[in-house]
Image: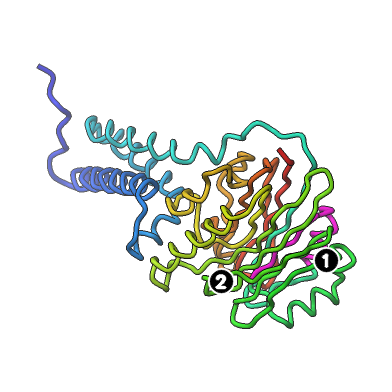
Amino acid sequence: MRRWPSPPRGGLTAVLWFLVVALGWAMLAVTAVAVWLHWYPSHGQNAVAATSFVPWAIIAAVLGVVALSLTRRWITLGLTVIAAVALVWTQIPLWHADAAAHGRRLVVVQSNIRLGQGDVTTLVKRVRDENADLLTVEELTPQALSRLHAAGISAELGYEYTAADSGGRGAGVFSRTALRDGVLLDGHTLNNVRAVTAVPGVGDVTIYAVHLLAPWPDPPSRWTGELAAMRADWMSRSGPVLASGDYNSTYDHKQFRDLLTGGFADAAVQSGSGFLPTFPRDRVYPPLIGIDHVVSRGFVADSVRSFDVPGSDHRGIVVTLRAS
């Protein structure tokens, strides 16, 4: 009868062996928890925060497989491989592009400019270089709005509907085509705005600049409520919808993915652009989580790219869509 591999007896080698096994078990636990966090709509503040980092658990899965392979813990290794495959499966939609659409092209630039401190000249240049049709901005202060005008945003996008405000509450939409029916939405702590524009070859499109309350440090129940309120407003609209902004939610949050029904889709998922972290950009380390999104109905995204905005704690994103 075959015997399971035994640990070495005594000395430093034995200590190292047990440490490597412990690492493997710990990485299995991290991987399994990450899979659970992706699928379960967590309500606790710590769990909701941890869900933002689910993609990084793939590193834990690899470490677990290596550690348990080295120590020949075959049963635990098998469980770790299963958990790793399950974790990778949760991320596949971000890497698999939908079928392309061939309708009218629309380019959207999105940026949270951190209490109005982001370099708005960078945004205007990005709009110009990308020949963008729309710009959505969050944390738009009255001073930042004045700087946007001074930087020449009106020469690029001649129409706007804004609700500039202090304390990170402001938001605005800037458009190449005329805007009408501008509304500051009820039911949100921060300013979320909606307007309608007539896009040639498409018709009326409802545009949102989205800035949802973060699930930390505020209670996650308020964040969940704002997600539900945003979805209810979307569903009240007919025709194409484009909702661009800082959702304070990642793709791994079940509550965010619940928005992506009824014809609504996230541009990163549609384009297969992969994991695209945008926050925080103002640290010594690179951004770790992706909370800036463009969600639409009636469009299919071709690409999503991020870019740096000096002075902001978010990277901006550029999304190219086609009417479907």
Q: Is residue 166 above or below residue 232?
A: below
- Decide if residue 9 is on the left or right side of residue 37: left
* Front of the two marks 2 and 1: 2
Quadrant placement of the C terminus: top right
Q: Quadrant of residue 222?
A: bottom left
Q: Residues within 10 Å of mark 1 (few under 14, many from 20)?
A: some
Furthest residue in direction left, as rendered: 1
The amino acid pointed to by label 2 is Asp
What residue did someone put label 1 on? 159
Q: Residue 37 placed where, x, y %?
A: 36, 50
What residue did someone put label 2 on? 186
The amino acid pointed to by label 1 is Tyr
- Which numbered circle lies on residue 317? none
- Decide if residue 74 is on the left or right side of residue 122: left
Q: Residue at x 24, y 30 (%)?
A: 74
Q: Are marks 2 and 1 in contact (CB under 8 Å)?
A: no
Q: Residue at x 85, y 59 (%)?
A: 128
Q: Residue 127 placed where, x, y %?
A: 81, 59
Q: Secondary structure under badge 2?
A: loop
How far apart marks 2 and 1 lie (CA) works out to: 23 Å
Q: Secondary structure under badge 1?
A: strand
Quadrant placement of the N terminus: top left
> What is the magenta range?
122-138
- Decide if residue 140 is on the left or right side of residue 156: left
